[in-house]
Image: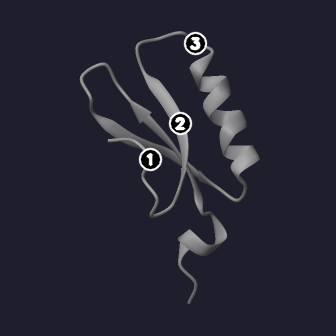
Amino acid sequence: MSDGAAALPWLVIRQDDNGNRYRVGRYATQGEAQKVADKLDEHGHEQLYWVERVGQSTRP
């Protein structure tokens, strides 16, 4: 059986204004994930959205 990390290795992560982080979704390509993050970021709320590869957190 295959795990989802191989098929959908790109994550969109949301961080709210209290520092809580949530996985928004998993995507097959970095470009697809970035489009989703950019679209969500357009709303202009306090949340931050970014893309990272499964197992490679880039945010502290």
Residue that appears at 31% across and 19% down: 17
| Secondary structure category for the residue under label 3 | loop
Q: Nearer the viewer, mark 3 or mark 2?
A: 2
Q: Are marks 3 and 2 in contact (CB under 8 Å)?
A: no
| Drawn side of residue 31 relative to residue 11, left or right | right
User: In the image, what residue type sits under mark 2?
Assistant: Trp
Which quadrant, please, contains the N terminus? bottom right
In this figure, which residue is indicated by the disc labeled 3?
A: 43
User: In the image, what residue type sits under mark 1?
Assistant: Thr
In this figure, which residue is indicated by the disc labeled 1?
A: 58
Task: Tell which circle, 2 or 1, labels the residue nearer the N-terminal end.
Answer: 2
Residue 50 numbered mark, or none? 2
Q: Quadrant of residue 60?
A: top left
Task: Tell which circle, 3 or 2, labels the residue nearer the N-terminal end.
Answer: 3
Residue that appears at 53% across and 36% down: 50
Residue lying furthest bottom? 1
